[in-house]
Image (cartoon, coloured by chain):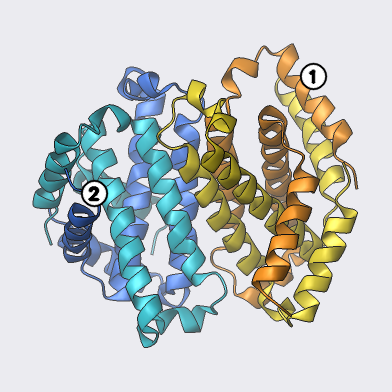
Chain colours: A orange, B yellow, C blue, D cyan
């Protein structure tokens, strides 16, 4: 799974609409937070077990796919604006977690 | 940038600690939400302009890298548990956005 | 400002619909989180200055009033389920903050 | 339960530290979001049933009281900055919900 071409499409999309001035880290983290809130709301009344059966309800399935995509899009845009390599940051964090939580 | 090996490390990490039972979609979306809250708190008192200068403060820089990594780790674990291909979901959403917001 | 009658209405509302089983602390905190996400999204592209002029846009004004009400309703329901006196908890926290952040 | 004196203490607290310039609606909604994230994280690995037994663990109990207080403090500060009467907004929303979700 690679996200480089997703990031490139997001850059082109924002540039074509002159949206870059809005895409400060502060604003993007708020947008990310808003989308995570929408994703959270989809699972709020489900039991943990029911949440694993999310594909059984076609409306829920479509909404989850839509919202997790929005979360991904804002996380990628935030990382791009910050100049952060998410995969490298993720590996570095797992390294730290391995020391913090020995198996 | 590829995340396949990050996801594999996360699977191994959870398996070695017998944490999979906790990793329901409901629980993971809460964990994701909690980490986004921590990331948000780092930018809350900054102006949008100041938020672009986050690397000027070494403590802030370290905290942002740490929290955006946590967000990434939980998003990847959620997608893995859901069986969702995030890159495909992201592309599909950009396709929809291109129709919804013509340039 | 008192919220006792709001809380009572929320109890009656939930009871009349047999929703209490869904209102566990875990579920209510997710609902609260989702509503805060919606409130956040209303301010995400505004500058801090613009966010103070929210009443200038009637649609934004209505949406802010709607979402801040939702946040309040879930916070009150969470506190009620937890058996927490929010005003007492708030005063106790200000007491702690006064020691932590001397003027 | 009344919150008027909590709001007054929060005003005095902010004034004594010259923090009002930071308390724009945009910034306060981010702070609220961050605190809700911390509250969410306390319940993320609990089952819904376990979340009702939060007082059984003294550390969890203290943390929940601390975080729900922080959420309350930022919600009150946001409402104060916006000039919104939260109780009135809450009642108006319940009125709308009664029409939207007939018992």
Dot 1 surroundings within 10 Å: few (below 14), some, or many (20 or more)? few
**Relative image position of residue B31 (x, y in whole percent):** 59, 62
Q: How many marks?
A: 2
* C32 to the left or right of C101: right
Q: Residues within 10 Å of mark 2 (few under 14, many from 20)?
A: few
> Residue B14 lies in what quarter of the image?
bottom right
Q: Which of the two residues, A70 or D6, is positioned nearer the viewer here?
A: D6
Q: Which residue is mark 1?
A: A12
Q: Are marks 2 and 1 in contact (CB under 8 Å)?
A: no
**Residue D33 to residue A25: above or below:** below
The chain carrying label 2 is: C
Q: Secondary structure at mark 1?
A: helix
Q: Callout 1: residue from which chain?
A: A
Residue D12 vertical placement versus A64 (above, below)? above
The quarter in which the C terminus of chain B is drawn is top right
Q: Position of residue C34 (x, y in %)?
A: 50, 52
At 23% from the left and 60% from the top, the residue drawn is C93
Residue placed under numbered mark 2 in the picture: C101
Residue A5, visible in the rendered structure: yes
Q: Closer to the camera, B54 or A55?
A: B54
- Taking A89 as reference, is C32 left or right? left
> Picture coordinates of residue D95 (x, y %)?
29, 50
Furthest-front residue in this view: B58
Considering the numbered disc 2 on the image, is that residue within a helix, a strand or a loop? loop
Left or right: B42, with A18 as reference point: left
Residue at horizontal 65 percent and vertical 17 percent from the top: A20
Is residue A23 positioned above or below D102 on the image? Answer: above
Judge whether residue A51 can be spotted in this image. Answer: no
Who's the residue at 34% across and 43% down the image?
A: C68
**Residue B24, image x, y percentages:** 68, 71
Q: CA distance from mark 2 to mark 1?
A: 46 Å
């Amino acid at each position: 799974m690679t996200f480089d071409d997703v990031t490139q499409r997001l850059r082109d999309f924002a540039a074509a609409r002159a949206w870059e001035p809005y895409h400060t880290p502060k604003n993007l983290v708020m947008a990310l937070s808003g989308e995570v809130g929408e994703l959270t709301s989809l699972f709020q009344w489900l039991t943990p077990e029911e949440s694993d059966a999310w594909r059984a309800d076609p409306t829920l399935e479509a909404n989850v796919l839509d919202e997790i995509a929005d979360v991904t899009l804002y996380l990628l845009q935030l990382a791009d604006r910050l100049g952060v390599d998410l995969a490298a940051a993720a590996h570095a964090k797992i390294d730290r977690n391995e020391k913090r939580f020995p198996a």
